Amino acid sequence: MRFRVERRSGVPTYLQLVRQVEQALRLGALQPGDQLPTAKAVVEETAINPNTVLKAYRELERGGLVEARPGRGTFVLRTLARPASEVDGVLRVELAGWMERAAGAGLSVEDVDALVADARARRFEGGGARA
Amino acid sequence: MTWLAWRRQRPALLVAFGLLAVTGVALAVARAVIEGRAAALGVGVCLTEATQQCFTGPVQPLYAGFRETFTMMRAWLVVAAPLVGVIVGAGLLAREVEQRTVLFVGTQAISRVGWWARTVAMALVPAVVGVLAVTLLAGWALEPYAVLYRQERIGTLDFDISGIWPVAATVLAFALAAAFGAVLRSSLAVVVATVGVWVVLYASLSETRYDLLPDAVDIVPAASYTGFFDIDGLPQDLVYRGAGGEVVELGVVARTCGSSGTTDLCAGVTQVELYYQPSSLFWPLQALQSAVVAVLASGLLAFSALRWRRVMPGGAR
Amino acid sequence: MRWSLMRGRVGSRGVGPVPEGAVRFDGVGKRFGGRSALRDCTFEVPRGRVAALVGPNGAGKTTLLMVATGLLRADEGRVEVLGADPARVGMPPGASFVAQDKPLYGTFRVREMLRAAAALNARGRWDAARAAGLVEAAGIGFDERVGALSPGGRARVALAIALGRDPELLLLDEPLAELDPLARRQVMGAVLAASAESGTTVVLSSHVIADVEDACDHLVLLGGGRVRLDGAVEDLLAQHRVITGATEPDGAVVHSSRSGRQVEALVRGTGDGEPPTLDDLVMGYLQAEDGRVAAAGAPS
């Protein structure tokens, strides 16, 4: 698993790491029993502070996603991937269709993003842009 | 650490040794050539004992042909000894400061003075050994020349290339280079300063050399005076005395007696006093001059060691 | 003027008793001729931190590091590095230093340079395998000439040698200067890997905040020879705010600037306003004039 750190994104680095691990778990790229990269390996590649990595791993541990085994490393406990079901397949097809129509109507990527973000915010976060 | 001292100074040491090696070869060749020439002319004996016949007749080409070689070889040897000292000494410390590796060395687990001492030893010992070897070789190689040209070891140019003086010259040049290297930042400046000061010191020492110890005197009756020829030493002065012990001016003698070379009872001269530095003073003079150098060199090396303990290239940027 | 905050253990790794600081300066001063390079410098870098020594060129960063390594002697104040006084013991054993320009013997081959380092550290700790491993990991050939290496290569070799001493404390003077972005990433990566692996405390100086802000969890800000800030980055950021408004705000204003009708102020406190970036904090304190920081209502 490789980490990518967006330095100017405004999101704290440790949180970026947490989210990237969660994403990997969701997509099944990380399975229970897999070992997370050591702090040494991560900092060697990303040049961030080792504390940041440890903070992220502690956060993940607190969430019950990983477990730190002293002397051995940090290991994944459970996955976030939902078992695939027919509903997923149908939703994907509908989404692909919607994308086609949006493209046909001349929407740009930014427009699509804005629409999707707004709809998602209304449904999942109780917010959304004021019209 | 020995390896490191050697490796750091490898270029300088190789140059110095190359210089000495070439000199050695040149010396051996010089001896071979003069012996060959003398043998060809049938006057080989003149190279082991110079008699009156060795200045005329078939020896003439020999005599005339090698005088310049002899002078050049000696002049080179006078220069070579301190040159070796400068070569191995100049880069010693100045280059460390120049390249700021002093900041590297000064932050490793080594005592700075210990490092300095090993560095100095690694440079000085081979230089001294090399110069000593070449000095001995020169003594052997130039012997025929010395015989032919009747040079006394105590004489100026010959003194400087014999005995322990060449080694002392090397040590002095080295100590000067080490001292300047601890103060100046560029190797070039160190070389210039060292050469300058060395020349001044050398000039002072040679100027005063023959005034240090008393002259010997040979009192020769005017009748049997045949010149400084048979003196065993370096002529310093000549005084003509009359019957009553009074001094007869050189100018008077010259005008009255002409240039015939004999002063037999001429202008009232009854005896000639020959003042000279006898050859037996060779070693005492060598010792005296070398002692002066030893004291100077010790002081300079001590100064360099102390400076090195606190050397810091002119403050941080 | 200096703002020193709670040097807590927030954000630090490891459990166990709180050890003494790795580097501690107390009222340190250093003059060169008539010029004062360091004045009343007081700060402490706790063990295990990756500390950035930040300040403009000429602020005294190199002088400070050289005093810490015993290359220079302080004129006043106390210096303690890993519990030892560098003025007495010279380079504190357990510490390593890489000077600006990464001085190495240019005519040596890399192999010989490592051998030289081993010879110079015969009396101390030297892990030849570690140093060689780091050189290899950097993709540098042992037969290359040191003088022919790229600036990044030189930095990696110098760092390999510094880490070969198995140090508890790594002092680096402008390690990223003159390096291209890739080399900067790699050198910082190597430094941080050492910190991650062995808990080595790192103090590195830089005049570019951006280079070090992701890597460092402790900040010592030097300006004009004085320590302006000293503390854990997390704490420092949490205890300041940037307030934008029409007028200068009340309270402990570090520095404010006006552009058009807006006044932007860096304030010491935990109330309204945005948390500052490290850049805001550093620029604010560097630009603040002496005595400008109001003492009223100063939080502890």
Image: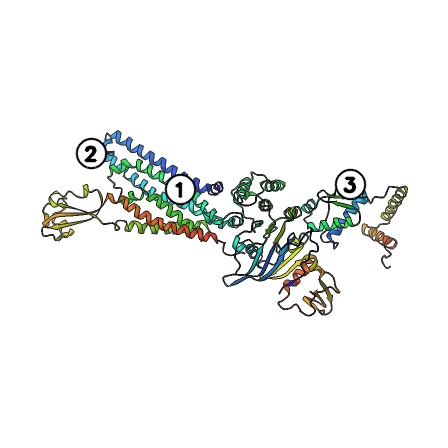
Q: Is residue B196 left or right of residue C154?
A: left
Find disc 3 in the rendering and name its residue.
A33
Residue type beneath disc 3: Gly
Q: Position of residue B40 (x, y in %)?
A: 26, 29
Crowd class of label 1 (few under 14; some 14 to 19; many from 20; radius 10 Å): many
Find disc 2 in the rendering and name its residue.
B57
Coloring scheme of the render?
A: rainbow
Calculate the distance from the C-alpha at mark 1 to the C-alpha at mark 3.
Answer: 69 Å
The N terminus of chain A: image quadrant: top right
Q: Residue furthest front?
A: C17
Q: Is residue A114 left or right of residue B19?
A: right
Which chain hosts label 1?
B
Which chain hosts label 3?
A
Observer-side mark, 1 or 2, equals 1
Identify the image quadrant of residue A85: top right
Calculate the distance from the C-alpha at mark 2 to the C-alpha at mark 3.
Answer: 109 Å
Give the camera-side residue of C249 and C148: C249
Residue type beneath disc 2: Gly
Find disc 1 in the rendering and name its residue.
B127
Instruction: Give above or below for C183 relative to C239.
Output: above
Mark 2 and mark 3 on one chain: no
* SS type, badge 3: loop
Whether tag 2 and tag 3 are in contact, CB under 8 A, the answer is no
Observer-side mark, 2 or 3, equals 3
Q: Position of residue C254 (x, y in %)?
A: 67, 66
